[in-house]
Image (cartoon, grey):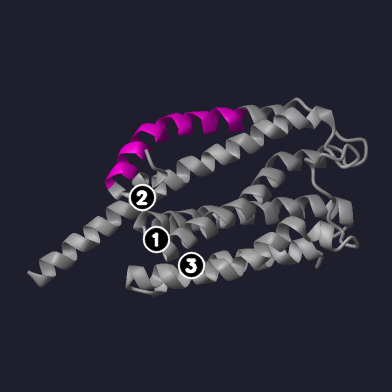
């Protein structure tokens, strides 16, 4: 069976109807374990104190903010090349989720930054590129809302997604590109010198898994809604033309 078969809205609706309940339950379990374990059963850091526990929200949300844009890039390319409407609608459905993840990452980063850096905001390369990514999310959502024809909106938002991918890449690798930045290195790294302490490692993995599953559940739910709205719009158009 080809993966492209699920670009058919009917087959996508059938598959997502079966998958959505299980993914939703797993998302709740992953988030509950990761956040409860992380916030209530891990020790304070000897330097950062209890502030270190923000990583259980900040790291997963920042990862998702960048990777959701990557998912939007892939589905936008599929739309531009193969003209599968489900792909365009999936990108549209993912954008508000990515915007929310970006907001969570910026907000929790500011909370962490004030006691660590003495300020809630600094024009650090990663923070700046992340703020620009947030603006691109806003622009992407606004562009969908501003254009009435869905195919034209899909084309223009896909192009915008291609441009915004530069800043998604910078958000991920800014620490490597500009070593003088304030932002610390990756919390999960193959380099043991940069890797998060073992006391936080497992609950952080649960939290990340929970965020990933939450995104999958939400994007499936929102894509199903977008497909239904497209069907309703098509029916109304036919009635007006009849």
Q: Is residue 14 left or right of residue 45?
A: left
Which stretch is magenta?
10-32
Residue denoted by label 1: 82
Residue wearing tag 3? 158
- Identify the residue at image location x=41%, y=55%: 87
Q: Is residue 33 among the parts visible in the rendering?
A: yes
Which is more foreground, mark 3 or mark 2? 2
Q: Is residue 70 magenta?
A: no
Which label was assigned to residue 159?
none
Q: Is residue 135 left or right of residue 202?
A: left
Mark closer to the chain start, 3 or 1: 1
Seen in the image, is 32 located left or right of residue 241? right
What's the CA distance linking mark 3 and mark 1? 13 Å
Q: Which of 212 and 189 is in front in this view?
A: 189
- Which callout, 2 or 1, points at the residue further toward the start of the chain? 2
Q: Residue 186: x, y in percent?
A: 80, 47
Name the residue at 66% across, 66% down.
166
| Residue 43 visible within the image | no
- Neighbor class of circle 1 (other Cα within 10 Å; few <14, some 14-19, many 20+) is few
Q: Is residue 18 magenta?
A: yes
- Taking depth in this image into account, of 2 and 16 the one nearest to the observer is 2
**154 or 34: which is nearer to us?**
154
Q: Which residue is drawn at 31% across and 49% down?
A: 8
Residue position for label 2: 7
Residue 25 drawn at (x, y percent): 48, 29
Q: Which residue is drawn at 79% across and 65% down?
A: 125
Q: Do the residues labelled 2 and 1 touch (CB within 8 Å)?
A: yes
Local packing at callout 3 (Cα closer than 10 Å; few below 14, some 14-19, many 20+) is many
């Amino acid at each position: 069976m080809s993966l492209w078969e699920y670009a058919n809205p009917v087959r996508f609706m059938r598959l997502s109807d079966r998958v959505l309940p299980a993914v939703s339950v797993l998302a709740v379990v992953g988030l509950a374990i990761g956040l409860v374990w992380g916030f209530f059963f891990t020790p304070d850091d000897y330097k950062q104190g209890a502030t270190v526990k923000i990583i259980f929200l900040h790291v997963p949300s920042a990862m998702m903010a960048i990777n959701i844009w990557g998912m939007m890039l892939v589905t936008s390319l599929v739309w531009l090349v193969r003209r599968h409407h489900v792909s365009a609608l999936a990108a549209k459905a993912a954008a508000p989720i990515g915007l929310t993840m970006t907001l969570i990452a910026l907000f929790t980063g500011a909370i962490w930054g004030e006691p660590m850096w003495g300020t809630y905001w600094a024009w650090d390369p990663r923070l700046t590129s992340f703020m620009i990514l947030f603006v691109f999310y806003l622009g992407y959502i606004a562009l969908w809302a501003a254009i009435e024809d869905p195919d034209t909106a899909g084309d223009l938002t896909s192009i915008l997604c291609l441009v915004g991918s530069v800043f998604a890449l910078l958000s991920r690798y800014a620490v490597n590109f500009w070593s003088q930045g304030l932002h610390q290195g990756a919390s999960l790294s193959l380099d043991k010198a940069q890797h998060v302490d073992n006391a936080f490692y497992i609950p952080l993995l649960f939290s990340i898994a929970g965020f990933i599953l939450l995104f999958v559940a939400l994007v499936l739910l929102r894509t199903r809604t977008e497909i239904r709205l497209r069907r309703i719009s098509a029916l109304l158009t036919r009635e007006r033309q009849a």
